[in-house]
Image (tube, grey):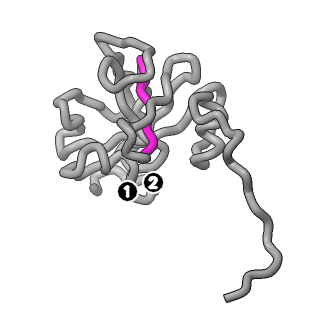
Amino acid sequence: MTVEGGVVIDVTKIDRCDVTQWAGYHGTEIQDGEVIVYKAVNDDLKSGRGFAYPIGETVTCPDWDPRDACGNGLHLSPRPHHARYYFESASRFLRCAVKLDELTVIDGNGSGVPKLKAKRVRVLAEVDIDGNTITKGKH
């Protein structure tokens, strides 16, 4: 096989610990100083650890620690399917907004599946696995 033309896209210089570079790399939008990310939850809008994420409300982590390590934060991902990796039995997905200065990118325990943790999360809407907003009453 012979391949001709094309462009090599070098991503080795992207600092994925920098939130804005992380968001750009994963195609996650930033609006008004907040990154838009996703949470996988169960039918009762609770995480795999039982933390509630009511739509339209802001939830706060009671034991926030900004270190680059799992735990001590509200964990989210750049896409719903990434979030499902961390909660495989999730039945619902939420679009959330997090202030850039209230989050830490974490490495996903070496899984290669991106995630971050936040001090505070504003739950915007329920979405499907592709990130499309679900109209009220359907899930």
Q: Which residue shows up at 31% across the image and 50% down it? A: 84
- Check whether the beta carbons of the residues at disc 1 and disc 2 lie within 8 A of each other: yes
Quarter of the rendering containing residue 46: top left
Q: Amino acid at mark 2?
A: Gly
**108 sits to left or right of 7:** left
What is the quadrant of the C terminus in the image? bottom left
Q: Most extreme residue toward the front, as rendered? A: 1
Quarter of the rendering containing residue 17: top right
Tell me the SS state at disc 2: loop
Give the magenta-colored segment's residue range.
113-119
Which residue carries the number 2 mark?
Answer: 131
- In the depicted structure, whether residue 17 falls above or below residue 27: above
Q: Which residue shows up at 79% across the image and 72% down it? A: 6
Quarter of the rendering containing residue 122: top left
Q: Which residue shows up at 18% across the image and 31% down it? A: 49
Identify which residue, 137 or 20, lies in the foreground.
20
Which residue carries the number 1 mark?
Answer: 128
What is the quadrant of the N terminus in the image? bottom right
Where's residue 108, x and y in %?
Answer: 39, 37
How crowded pointer 2 is (Cα within 10 Å; few <14, some 14-19, many 20+) is rated as some
Tell me the SS state at disc 1: loop
